[in-house]
Image: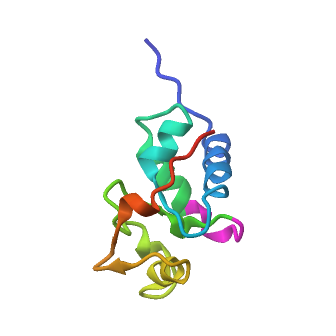
Amino acid sequence: MKTVKPDNENFFERVYAIVRQIPEGKVTSYGAIAKALGTARSARMVGWAMNASHTLEDVPAHRVVNRKGLLSGKHHFDGTNLMQQLLENEGIKVIDNQIIDFDKHFWEPVF
């Protein structure tokens, strides 16, 4: 059986379309985005898309965290605490790279 690899460019654009919908003050996870796209086992590829998104001003990458609410992508932002600062500016409290009240701030994407 031959494995079909997704078209990365198209996949990345589909990821960005979901990320653009995340409301201010909310976050979602790589896995939740993958699930919404119908590719539940591709959370890592969603992460690659987010890593490539930092040149796109209209993609709020800071609103995508890991499944436990950790700021796992923070090292891709300029400055030591930029991801945390952006989230805190939206009313999301972060301590030790962990979103406080993660369930309260979690947004489930629907695509």
Residue 57 magenta-highlighted: yes
> Does residue 12 appear to the left or right of 64 in the view shown?
right
- Residue extending farthest front: 104
Q: x%, y% of residue 23?
A: 62, 62
> Does residue 56 appear to the left or right of 41 in the view shown?
right
Q: Quadrant location of the N terminus?
A: top left
Q: x%, y% of residue 97?
A: 32, 75
Q: Range of the magenta residues?
A: 52-58
Q: x%, y% of residue 74?
A: 42, 74
Residue 110 magenta-highlighted: no
Numbered marks: total:
0
Residue visible at 69% across and 67% down?
56
Say above or below: 8 vs 5.
Answer: below
Residue visible at 52% across and 62% down?
51
Say above or below: 89 vs 67.
Answer: below
Q: Quadrant location of the C terminus?
A: top right
Residue visible at 40% across and 35% down?
41
Q: x%, y% of residue 48?
A: 49, 54
> Does residue 73 appear to the left or right of 24 in the view shown?
left
